[in-house]
Amino acid sequence: MDKEFWKTAARQVCLAALFGAVFSLLALALAAILVKSFSLPQSSVTAIDWSVRCAAALFSGVLFIRGERSLCKGAAAGLLFAVLTLFLFAMIGGGLHIDGFFVLELVVSAILGGVGGLLGAKLRKT
């Protein structure tokens, strides 16, 4: 592995994680408006939050990860995405809360990021 590979890999991982964080922030802001407008039950908020975060972790890998070792780069992007959103929503919401759900979110984001990275690499090969 040469220096150029690691530079490209770091750029892909960072771009994927940033895109996922921005996408989830905007999508969840829109979802909050919809939940407030239609008086949806509080239990739907958690489902919407998880759905948006999972979609962001998956599709950011598909869009930004390419080349060799795409599974590892996608998983790294998923982990970085989960950490970025933790701090982003902590700044917005006013508190940092790390619990069992965050550990689950790390695992799910890494798996979905890895799958997204594999899909992104395969889509660009054909």
Image: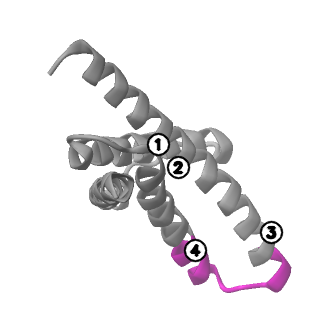
Mark 2 residue crowding within 10 angstroms, few (<14) / some (14–19) / many (20+): many
State which quarter of the image contains the N terminus.
top left
Q: Is residue 9 left or right of residue 40?
A: left
Asked if the residue at tag 1 contacts the one at tag 2, i.e. Cβ–Cβ closer than 8 Å, the answer is: yes
Q: Main secondary structure of the magenta part?
A: helix
Q: Nearer the viewer, residue 80 or 6?
A: 6
Q: Nearer the viewer, mark 2 or mark 4?
A: 2
Magenta-tinted stretch: 36-48
Asked if residue 126 shows in the view, the reply is yes
Report how far apart the C-alphas of labels 2 and 3 lie in the structure.
Answer: 20 Å
Residue of label 1: 16
Residue 38 sits in which quadrant? Answer: bottom right
Asked if residue 106 shows in the view, the reply is no
Name the amino acid, label 2: Gly
Report how far apart the C-alphas of labels 3 and 4 lie in the structure.
Answer: 12 Å
Which residue is situated farthest in the right direction here?
37
Pick whichever of labels 3 and 1 is earlier in the sequence: 1
Residue of label 2: 20
Label disc, if present, on residue 48 of the rendered structure: 4
